């Protein structure tokens, strides 16, 4: 009888310890989170799947990196998969999400994850991993990010309208947006270096195409090139490369903006504002310095998240 009591007591103590551990594990994002919760190989499997999509569609990797920013910038918890909740009134119906695409990639990775470990791997984590894998796929740093984000259940176009910065954003706005993630000025400049890959549509540079516009490129040659590229823009499909090497994650973006060849107004401002120009010069001269700052910036960008019981893990991402 006495030994039964002891066994039960020990059992209860173990149960309490296990419960507390689970709570601690969940309350913060953790490196290797899915191994800790018993779902092994998640990061490798996600990398394999998204790389397959990147090879099949050369525009997909840049799309995933932008998607990560737009998910983390808007939503009740930041990086919370809220961008995947479509439909009228959802984030994707905001004009500021113009050009955001290939959400189906996240959805198909999620379907695979559901077979591996049902309702365990969040849509928010898959988006953050896909963005980070896009960087490495294009030759950028292989960033380690903590995981364990939870998903939101709501999504608001009004919030996306208010929070997603337009192409014409000032440097004050850039500092406000990225400062809210805890980024330094060096990191805020580095994270905009994401524009080293991908493209923009003519719609996003309308303000720069008139010669009398205050945001028109100084270089007549560059302005003429942009205007010519956008002269025939049927159905808004014409695109311009964000930098001269749109498929390589390198520091070309900083060299281009230094030379007055920034695509968006915000890129151009980055190279001329006295607070950011010296940082642009450093990254243009030193790819390693850019990569180091980008890595810490990406971890900060993706760390504003729902954790523990603040959210749930949805069983499908696209709604
Ligand atoms: C103030 C901040 C930012 C502004 C104003 C901005 C603005 C834009 C605009 C206007 C486009 C082109 C949309 C189009 O015409 O299709 C774009 C594309 C892109 N942005 Fe940003 N962006 C910002 C920050 C970021 C951040 C933080 C990231 C990622 C970490 C990012 C990654 C990208 C990528 C990869 C593309 C190319 C997408 C593609 O090719 O599909 N941007 N951005």
Image (cartoon, rainbow, N blue to C red):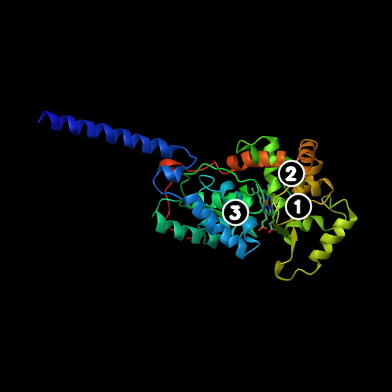
Relative depth, front residue between 306 and 3: 3
Identify the residue position indicated by label 3 in the image.
Answer: 67
Q: Image point 87% across, 60% down: which residue?
A: 224
Identify the residue position indicated by label 2 in the image.
Answer: 170
Which tag, 2 or 3, sits closer to the chain's start?
3
Relative placement, left or right, of 239 versus 260 is left
- Within-10-Å neighbours for mark 1: few <14, some 14–19, many 20+: many
Q: Can you tell me whether the CB of the residue at mark 1 lies under 8 Å from the nearest atom of ligand 1?
A: yes
Relative placement, left or right, of 146 versus 97 is left
Residue 81 seen in render: no
- Whole-number angstrom distance, CA of label 2 to CA of label 3: 22 Å
Mark 2, secondary structure of its residue? loop
Identify the residue position indicated by label 1 in the image.
Answer: 264
Which tag, 2 or 1, sits closer to the chain's start?
2
Q: Image point 80% across, 49% down: which residue?
A: 256
Q: Can you tell me whether the CB of the residue at mark 3 lies under 8 Å from the nearest atom of ligand 1?
A: no
Mark 3, secondary structure of its residue? helix
Q: Nearer the viewer, mark 2 or mark 3?
A: 3
Which tag, 1 or 3, sits closer to the chain's start?
3
Residue 128 screen position, x and y as percent: 55, 49
Q: Nearer the viewer, mark 2 or mark 1?
A: 1
Q: Indicate the quadrant where residue 226 lies.
A: bottom right
């Amino acid at each position: 009888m006495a030994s039964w009591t002891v066994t039960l007591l020990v059992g209860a103590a173990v149960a309490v310890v296990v419960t507390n551990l689970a709570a601690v594990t969940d309350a913060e994002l953790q490196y290797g989170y899915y191994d800790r919760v018993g779902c092994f190989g998640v990061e490798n499997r996600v990398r394999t799947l998204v790389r397959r999509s990147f090879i099949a569609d050369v525009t997909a990797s840049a799309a995933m990196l932008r998607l990560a920013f737009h998910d983390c910038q808007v939503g009740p918890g930041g990086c919370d998969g809220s961008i995947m909740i479509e439909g009228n009134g959802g984030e994707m119906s905001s004009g500021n999400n113009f050009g955001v695409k290939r959400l189906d990639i996240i959805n198909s990775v999620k379907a695979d994850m559901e077979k591996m470990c049902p309702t365990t791997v969040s849509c928010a984590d898959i988006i953050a991993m896909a963005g980070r894998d896009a960087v490495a796929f294009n030759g950028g740093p292989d960033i380690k990010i903590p995981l364990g984000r939870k998903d939101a259940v709501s999504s608001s176009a009004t919030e996306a309208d208010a929070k997603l910065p337009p192409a014409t954003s000032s440097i004050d706005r850039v500092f406000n947006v990225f400062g809210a993630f805890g980024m330094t000025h060096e990191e805020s400049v580095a994270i905009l270096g994401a524009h080293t890959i991908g493209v923009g549509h003519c719609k996003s540079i309308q303000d720069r195409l008139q010669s009398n516009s205050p945001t028109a490129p100084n270089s007549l040659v560059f302005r003429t090139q942009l205007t010519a590229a956008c002269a025939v823009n049927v159905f808004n499909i014409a695109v311009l490369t964000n930098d001269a090497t749109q498929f390589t994650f390198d520091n070309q973006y900083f060299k281009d903006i230094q030379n007055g060849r920034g695509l968006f107004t915000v890129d151009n401002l980055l190279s001329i504002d006295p607070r950011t120009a010296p940082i642009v010069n450093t990254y243009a001269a030193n790819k390693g310095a850019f990569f180091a700052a980008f890595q810490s910036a990406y971890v900060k960008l993706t760390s504003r998240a729902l954790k523990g019981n603040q959210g749930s893990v949805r069983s499908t991402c696209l709604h």
